[in-house]
Image (cartoon, rainbow, N blue to C red):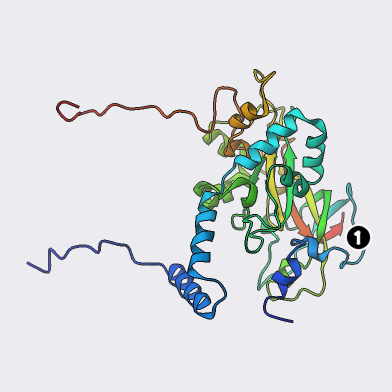
Amino acid sequence: MAEKHKPAPMVDEVSDFEVLEVAVRELAIEKGLFSAEDHRRFAEFAHSIGPLPAARLVAKSWLDPEFKKLALEDGFTASKEVGIDWLNPTGFGTPSDYCDLRVLENTPSVHHVVVCTLCSCYPRPILGHSPEWYRTPNYRRRLVRWPRQVLSEFGLQIPADVEVRVEDSNQKCRFMVMPMRPEGTEDWSEDQLAEIVTRDCMLGVALPHPERKADDKRPVHKAANPVHGH
Amino acid sequence: MSRGHHAEKATGKGDPQCFRGEAPAPKFKVGDRVRIRDLPDIFYTRCQVYTRGAEGVVTVVTHESPAPEDEAWDNVDKPEWFYIVRFKQKELWPEYPDVYENDTLQTEFSERWLESA
């Protein structure tokens, strides 16, 4: 009877990769390659990066044709204007990615969408960490072959006369999409424009909309069975 | 070579910038029609199977770098040029719908994978 009611373990088993990470990290600390404090600081940094610098790059390009030209020709140099140095993205330590950023410009006749079929290549210094779905075999396998169907699952229908151009990021280049500036944003400031360029717009699975910001208020749903008096 | 030679070489320059000037002149230029070769890849490759044998057009000559098939084994002494190639989706997937015949896909190859078409 007691055997039957043996409680399930509270925590799932640790994966081999996690064991390996801890082992290598502890060896490196013992060897003096870096300290535990360095590691904590890097982990904190890694969790704080996001798509805001890339949104700023797009907004600046919409307003400044000279900057747009630079962004399309030399993403590495243009990134510095929005505070990202690909050689030293953390401000300490080593580069964390390859350094060849390519910006793909959407036009009325071409819509770009980015995938990495081989793993999950992603312009992390400027766009933060990739979303979970970007790393799934489902997205990686299907986007190259059925791009319009996958985009429609994201709620994005591209007209038949617009060329959908999939960019399979398989080598050292890193890609982000420069979406078209939506109507209804005339006279907007760079700050206002940057707010509507969300991460998904820069991967090509969404389009910017003047009424949709990355930090929009979330809807509040009232509890179905509220606690008495609350 | 030290164990950290790759990081040492890239520090202050970036990777692939640190291989600039190390490859022979590029064999292809923007606009060239190319076919993807079907080379053996029993150890490591980044050349997708779905592109083998397909024909496309070079759209960007990107940079110099050791090919991944070499770099995976730390053989970094023979960098080559890399190219972004654009394919018609119909060329890659025969069943791709005719109504979307303008759709394309771009991906990147090291020079060894390309031949003139």
Looking at numbered disc 1 in the image, what kind of residue is underneath it?
Answer: Lys
A14 left or right, relative to A180 = left
Picture mark count: 1
Query: Considering depth in this image, is A109 or A174 the residue closer to the camera?
Result: A174
In the rendering, at what x and y percent does residue B34 appear? 84, 54
Element under disc 1:
loop
Query: Considering depth in this image, is A75 or B24 the residue closer to the camera?
Result: A75
In the rendering, at what x and y percent does residue A181 appear? 69, 26
Residue at image position (35%, 27%) is A220
Q: Which residue is mark 1?
A: B27
In the rendering, at what x and y percent does residue B61 appear? 84, 53
In the rendering, at what x and y percent does residue A175 appear? 69, 47
Vertical side of A2 occupied by B61: above or below: above
- Report the quarter where the N terminus of chain A lies: bottom left
Name the outermost residue toward the left.
A1
A123 left or right, relative to B22 = left
Q: Is residue B93 visible?
A: no
Q: Is residue A176 visible?
A: yes
A79 left or right, relative to A156 = right
Residue at image position (66%, 24%) is A182
The local crowd at label 1, few if under 14, some if 14 to 19, many if 20 or more residues have their Cα within 10 Å, is: few
